[in-house]
Image (cartoon, rainbow, N blue to C red):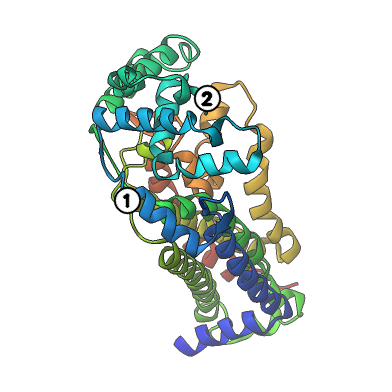
Amino acid sequence: MTQMIYYEIKKIFSQHSAKLALLLLCVTLGVTTFLTVHSVSWIDEQGEKTAGPSAAQKLRAARKEWAGYVDEDVIRRVIEENARVNATPEAQSSNVVQQEIAFSKKQGFYDIRMMIARSFSGFRELDYYLPDSLTPEDASRFYPNRMAQLTEWLDGEAKDTFSESEREWIIQKYQELPTPLWYDYAEGWLNLQTYSATIIMISLLILVFPIAGIFSGEAAQKADAIFFSTYHGRRRAVLAKLCAGFLVITGTYWTMMLIYTAVTLGLLGTDGADCLIAVFRWKTLYELTNGQAYALIVLGGYLGCLFMLLLAMLVSAKTKSTAFAVTIPFFLMFAPGFLSGSHNAMLTKLIGLLPDQLLQMNTVFSLFSLYRVGTHICRSAPLLFAIYPAACILLLPLIYRVFRRTQVA
């Protein structure tokens, strides 16, 4: 059996499309990793900008000075320091370089300044310059603002969106957030979260080409009659194809993501893994740390890729068409976007549970998507992680059964 699986894997990678796919995957990995690492920038005292690992080291040193619990005293200090920098000649100059020099003095407390901007802006608004108008006395309103924003939104814009029980559930989740929040430099984790969807989606769209031909390849080569007439053709040979597809998907995905994660964290640092994501996105129903959030993003990406590629394999086994099977991931990824503007509540909830959401878990963590399961209220992420492992498990025997019963013309 092992030799048969090895042979099927060898067949997959002997195809020109598979070799091209591997090349494209390597290019995707390199480009995405480069963009992730070089999205971190640093502006020096002369106003000159650098990016990459060296910039990350300087930024890390600056932000480490502000690491710790973000309490009222810290908020007051940031408001005062922000006002002090704004009063400098560089900040008041109309010269771009001088303004960059002024901004360089805010880099250390930039993340906390953005927390303040989110706290004092509206629930669905972000005024970057709002902290410039605050006084140290406003620091006491920093955490109360979070609950006040939510209550105002629930009583206003979202009044007809949630039931009374859902409204109470959301408020309870907000109240459960432990404050004051702990802050630390976390560029490595934040950039991984931001760019992960790119590498996951592109990997899926490239990987589908060799995977879609696993079952339809025999028909395309007119070898299906020979394949099914052999002693193990409708049993072990079919199972070998299924195992080969699963191993190729799993091995390729995790190799890509492990390299991407290791290189990015190695160059940008692993600091901030234990910071709650609420520090950087403020409005979230998920009490997760950066490390936990990224682990779920990677796992969600794997489940999404596995489900869509297994579905492509099923279509390939049923239709004997590689071309048709290739369209499945494309359809599942892009079709929901055309329906997302719908005002139908049921359709909106359905869209929130489609497999494309697993590929962009970083976005899911910012959504207020609630579902009722019996008497319980659930967020979308737990449901996604409950639905799609079961769906993948069901697809495996279904693919085996469909291809095993294939009729040869």
**Residue occupying the point 68% across, 48% down:** 331
Q: In the figure, is residue 160 to the left or right of 21?
A: left
Q: Where residue 61 sits in the image (x, y, percent)?
A: 36, 55
- Which residue is the extreme one toward the bottom? 3
Residue at 57% over, 29% down? 92
Between the residue at mark 2 and the residue at mark 1, the CA separation in whole angstroms equals 25 Å
Residue 367 coordinates in the image, percent (x, y): 46, 33
Residue denoted by label 1: 64
Amino acid under disc 2: Asp
Q: Quadrant of residue 35?
A: bottom right
The spot of residue 134 in percent (x, y) is: 41, 20
Above or below for 253 versus 120: below
Reply above or below: 301 against 336.
Answer: below
Circle 2 Cα neighbour tier, 10 Å, few/some/many (<14 / 14–19 / ≥20): some
* Nearer to me, 195 or 369: 195
Q: Quadrant of the C terminus?
A: bottom right
Camera sees residue 389:
no
Q: Residue type at mark 1: give it.
A: Lys
Q: Is residue 187 left or right of residue 17?
A: left
Q: Is residue 9 visible?
A: yes
Q: Which residue is mark 2?
A: 127
Q: Give the total number of marks visible in the rendering.
A: 2
